[in-house]
């Protein structure tokens, strides 16, 4: 298995280039199934989730070609004829559940495995299923699979109000509704930039959608969609991650450049909290510059749906608080159990505790290298971040979590000045095999 070996303390000079968004690429790939022909997606990151989802798509019949160097993904969906997403693939990645909407939208029926457990909290799919029923699908659950069918091969359309607002359910319902026989309305819809970019791609394909970026989305179904070429958006979570990293590990007073992101997708809450830490920040269309302060102010945050503070950046914020002078809190209102990184950060000496859905961090103490274990994607990047400012060596184990969502992270960090290497290790090594033979 792979691990990162990080030697902390080297200043992060930058630049830290931002790649294409994982969370937008995946629904764009699902959308490609709706068109009878070849769709080309550009700026697609070379990530494990993209490769996994390519395999999920292939099961239903299309030819999927990924050129990782060019970041180009081509999907010839003329052969979609097997509307199934099997457990063996869906269990690897929750976003595979987008196949429910994509296959209903294209084939009028679907057999999609329930995603199963997740690294943090309960993550149900009830809204995806209830929404499809509200739009006219018949749904049965059999042997861990959702079996969906539609009257005469198309959804009717309808109205569905989701509570809470869900990114994934909004995407799934849009995938189904765009080719419905009638009109559909999604109330309390997700307005995350990922949903907007995905919806714009559907519009480009010929879908009739109003209200993207608002809480109410209305769709008028069309008979068929056209294949297109579409550019994926930059990854806003990678941008936010790099901004936090620059603030804690950059040389105080010296700007760190973060090119390639779209700061408008960060949302107002993150920007406001970030500036309140004392970090200097400037934004242009494709460049964010962060100037680390001498002392970071501990700013308490609470996550929320867009334009609230993204839950996908809260683990990283915990590390910022550990580097600040004083005490701050991180409260997650989107997921109340997303704190698996806290016991690992404690192993590095960080003074953090969890109570309910709030982590309290007493910053300013020494952070010292240790062996730590990745538990999920965003948690694992917070460990690498803490390791980069720790005294001595940290081994971050199980970086396969990180490879799901950060492209060439170690290369980017090395080029920006940090000491980080990828190495392999034996997951089942024992104290005996580790013992120094001398
Ligand atoms: C997406 C993102 C993930 C991010 C999350 C919240 C992708 C691939 N993943 O996940 O990185 O952390 O948005 O911004 O884009 N819920 C229900 N029932 C449902 C569906 C969701 O109760 O059927 C709840 C969830 O438990 C959670 C809330 O709704 O409390 C929001 O989750 P949701 O927006 O659906 O997250 P995902 O789409 O899974």
Image (cartoon, rainbow, N blue to C red):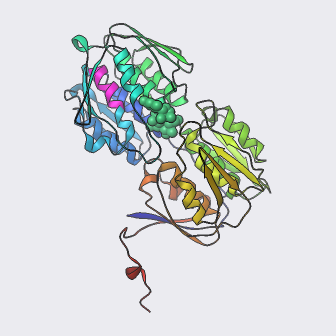
Image: 333 above or below 348? above
The reply, left or right, for residue 395 in relation to residue 348 is left
Q: Tell whether position 99 is magenta.
A: yes
Q: Residue furthest top?
A: 182
Determine the residue positioned at 67% across, 51% down.
360
Determine the residue positioned at 70% across, 37% down.
271
Image: 113 above or below 365? above
Whether residue 103 is visible here, answered yes or no, is yes
- Quadrant placement of the C terminus: bottom left
Indicate the position of residue 397 as horizontal and vertical percent values: 46, 63
Image: 368 above or below 188? below
Image: 120 above or below 8? above
Indicate the position of residue 56 as horizontal and vertical percent values: 29, 38
Q: Residue furthest front?
A: 356
- The segment highlighted magenta reads 98-106
Q: Residue furthest bottom?
A: 438
Whether residue 21 is visible here, answered yes or no, is no
Which one is nearer the viewer's eye here, 228 or 89? Answer: 89
- Quadrant placement of the N terminus: bottom left
**Magenta region, main secondary structure:** helix
Indicate the position of residue 207 as horizontal and vertical percent values: 40, 15
Indicate the position of residue 337 as horizontal and vertical percent values: 52, 45
- How many discs appear? 0
Q: Tell whether position 35 is magenta.
A: no
Which of the 4 image quadrants contains residue 347? bottom right
């Amino acid at each position: 298995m792979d691990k990162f070996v990080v030697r902390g303390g080297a200043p992060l000079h930058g630049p830290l280039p931002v790649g294409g968004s994982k969370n937008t690429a995946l629904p764009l790939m699902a959308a490609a199934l709706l068109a009878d022909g070849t769709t080309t997606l550009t700026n697609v990151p070379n990530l494990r989730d993209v490769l996994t989802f390519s395999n999920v798509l292939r099961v239903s019949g299309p030819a999927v070609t990924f050129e990782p160097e060019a970041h180009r993904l081509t999907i010839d969906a003329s052969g979609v004829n097997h509307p199934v997403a099997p457990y063996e693939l869906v269990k690897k990645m929750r976003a595979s559940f987008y196949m429910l909407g994509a296959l209903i939208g294209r084939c009028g029926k679907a057999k999609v495995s329930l995603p199963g457990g997740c690294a943090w909290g309960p993550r149900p799919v009830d809204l995806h299923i209830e929404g499809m029923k509200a739009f006219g699908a018949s749904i049965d659950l059999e042997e861990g699979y959702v079996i969906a069918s539609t009257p005469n091969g198309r959804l009717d359309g309808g109205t569905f109000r989701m509570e809470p607002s869900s990114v994934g359910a909004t995407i799934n319902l849009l995938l189904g509704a765009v080719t419905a026989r009638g009109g559909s309305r999604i109330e309390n819809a997700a307005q995350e930039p990922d949903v907007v970019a995905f919806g714009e791609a559907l519009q480009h394909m010929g879908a009739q959608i109003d209200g993207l970026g608002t809480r109410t989305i209305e769709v008028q179904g069309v008979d068929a969609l056209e294949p297109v070429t579409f550019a994926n958006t930059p990854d806003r979570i990678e941008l936010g991650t790099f901004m936090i990293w620059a603030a804690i590990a950059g040389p105080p007073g010296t700007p760190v450049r973060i090119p390639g992101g779209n700061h408008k997708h960060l949302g107002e809450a993150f920007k406001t909290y970030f500036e309140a830490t004392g970090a200097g920040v400037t934004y242009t269309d494709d460049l964010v510059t962060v100037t680390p302060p001498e002392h970071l102010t501990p700013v308490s945050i609470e996550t929320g749906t867009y334009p609230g503070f993204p839950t996908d950046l809260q683990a990283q914020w915990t590390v910022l608080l550990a580097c600040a002078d004083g005490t701050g809190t991180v409260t997650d209102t989107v997921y109340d159990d997303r704190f698996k990184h806290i016991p690992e950060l404690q192993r590095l000496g960080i003074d953090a505790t969890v109570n309910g859905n709030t982590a309290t961090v007493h910053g300013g103490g020494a952070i010292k290298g240790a062996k730590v274990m990745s538990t999920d994607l965003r948690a694992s990047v917070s460990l690498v971040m803490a390791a980069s400012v720790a005294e001595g060596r940290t081994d971050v184990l199980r970086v396969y979590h990180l490879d799901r969502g950060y492209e060439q992270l170690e290369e980017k960090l090395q080029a920006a000045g940090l000491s980080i290497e990828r190495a392999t290790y034996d997951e089942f090594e024992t104290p005996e095999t580790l013992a120094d033979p001398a």
